[in-house]
Image (cartoon, rainbow, N blue to C red):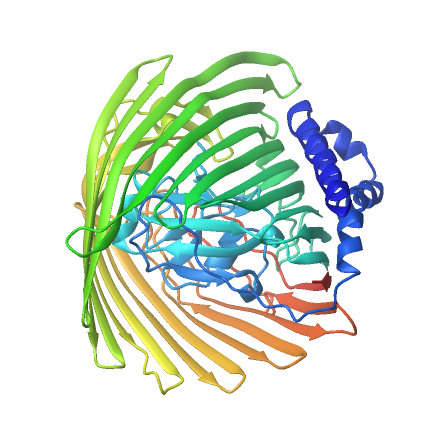
Amino acid sequence: MVVILYAIAVLLCFCVALRILFAGAAAWWRTPVPGLLSVTCLLIFSPFSLVVAQTAVLEEVRVIGRRDTGAALGVSTADLLAFDEQVSLNRTVGDWIEQLPGVSLNGQGGLFQAYSIRGFSRWRIRTEVNGVPIITDRRAGNSASFVPPDLITQVAVEKSASSTLYGSGAMGGVVGLDTRPAQGLSVKAEAANNGEQFSLTALSGRSDGLSAGMSVRRASDADDPTGDSLNTGFEQFAGLLAGHADLGGLSVNYSWIPSLGRDIGKSNALYPEIRSSSYPKEKHSVGQFELRSRGDWFLRAYHHYQDWDADVVRLGERRNVTRYQAHTVGGLFQASTALLRGEGSLGVEWVGRRGVSIDEQEFSSDGQLLFNQQLVDGDEDTLAVFADQQWVGGGLSVSGGLRYDQIEQSSDQRSDSDGQWSASAAIDYTLGDSWSTRAELASGYRFPGLSERYFNGTTPRGEVLGNPDLEAETRQSAEIGVTFEPPSSALRGALSLYYSDLENYIERYSISPLLVSYRNLDGASIQGLELDFGLQTGPVNHRLSYQWQEGEDDQGNTLADLNPPGFRYFMSWQGQRQGVYSDLSFRPSRDEFGADEQPLDSAWIWNARYTQRVAGNWNAELFVSNILDEDYRSTADDVAPLQPGRTFGLRLEWRKS
């Protein structure tokens, strides 16, 4: 009976979410938040609480591992970040991964803040949510900001050259988000003073069965350290429905994430005197269904629907409203192989983009409509076949992979097609019990996006002119790494050196102060190093990292989007009931900068949090971000704003297994 009640409750919530997603968010936003939360929580959690009440309170045990994401399952060099390892502002997944050496924030500020991996950003990074590729036509690239951090279990970041085996859009790396399977019942509330930030997240269910959850969050405009207002306000609602079932020798996994946002500020240095940019509405629906056969093969089908508006007001001049819609559908089949006593996989992937539509309206300063036009109306199909294999013997491991992609793009203006091969080879060798080395070679590519080729219109950055004659950019890269991790010592360390040679690199450049476009560079290169040391002393964990990078085109001009150099020291102490976490970084000044960028000043950035297990099932956290109230910009973008000033916050969580 309990199962039936719970299924009915989840079905009702599912139908309500569908109604909200496809009928519009206006009715939801007019509903008082306390009333909505009460009704939804009652529907979702009351049936399940009957089961929980009959069971003893168990100690929570979390096992975190990387899911199969994308097409290169032979790649196993990803860095994993769990939801309880995050110390900074916790706005989006970009705040999580920024703590890794070789990763930094990129572009402008606010909720849509993007990220850069080893000097690659925008459309060169493949972002996935539960294995679903998130493809958008924002010039800043993908940020997955529509998924609240409290619904994320972990993030896998693939920085190595082998990421190219994930296909076009993964030339610079892969960021994979896994949503959190519910373990019993939990409710978390968070509030912060700077920007009146607030969020409430509730989850219920079982990791091996059906689970559901939701997250509501909002924020007003925050203040920077000088007291000026930042355009960082937003309102957002997201849900999560996930499940697992065994059918004989097969297992079924599925997930669905609806997300709604409104009045999302695009924070930049031009606000508010010159330009005000915002996203009045944003809708997303991400779903996937997977059928798996005990490690022999799996089949995944997925979709991602998105619909959002951008509103750019140039004070005293004009207003431009852009509407964007697109639907990504696709499938991935992968089977295990064993060639010449090795282990690997063979598969095929299809990614289709349907109804990619961008419309623009322009209004005069007094509100008169000047024009209404469609800028892009296109479709895209990518079909790929791939294979990877690994052989292990003694202390030596040899792996390799090969992939071919064929792409077809069409719009109301013209059609284009192209095909590219990518390949990867790596050797890992263990030297005794403490040392290991890795050498890797790879080739990759990226097809130009629909908006890079065909979009001519207004964005929150400014006017953009597409270039339909862009060629695919290619990358030849090499990486060498050394790792020290003795089994009987608490000390560990790693050094990575990498180099990339780029052909037809697509650069955004300024035609005039108010107009940008894209062009292919004849050649460019990026090189850098990363150092990462760790030390465990009893309950205290120390981690010290450093990153350095440079990149130039064949004319000696600095490339844009490079990671600034910097040191980072992370410390955590965990007792039986308390925990202390500190994240301190120093970024030296950088005078070299690329197109549409500016120099960066040096900065000390310090974030910390304190956790306390309170009586019963309660946990509390106090956190402070930008403790030093440092006046700094997180990126070299020429219109990047200052980051928010010192912020105090409190999190409360009630959990019952």
Left or right: residue 486 versus residue 87 is: left
Q: Which of the 4 quarters of the picture holds residue 291?
A: top left
Position of the N terminus, as image quadrant, is top right
Q: Position of residue 549 (x, y in %)?
A: 29, 60
Q: Which of 46 and 554 is in front in this view?
A: 46
Residue at 52% in and 64% down: 63
> Is residue 501 in sight in this rendering?
no
Q: Which of 312 and 608 is in front in this view?
A: 608
Residue at 62% in and 39% down: 264
Residue at 48% in and 21% down: 358
Position of the C terminus, as image quadrant, is bottom right
Q: Position of residue 508 (x, y in %)?
A: 33, 36
* Above or below 186: residue 607: below
Q: Where is residue 23 in the image (x, y as percent from the top left)?
A: 68, 23
Q: Which of 32 and 635 is in front in this view?
A: 32
* Above or below 593: residue 361: above
Q: Which of 492 and 67 is in front in this view?
A: 67
Q: Where is residue 567 in the image (x, y as percent from the top left)?
A: 40, 70
> Is residue 87 in sight in this rendering?
yes
Residue lying at the far left of the rendered structure = 340
Left or right: residue 391 versus residue 212 is: left
Left or right: residue 190 versus residue 440 is: right
Q: Which of the 4 quarters of the picture holds residue 618?
A: bottom right
Left or right: residue 398 versus residue 185 is: left
How many numbered marks have been drawn onto this rendered protein structure? 0
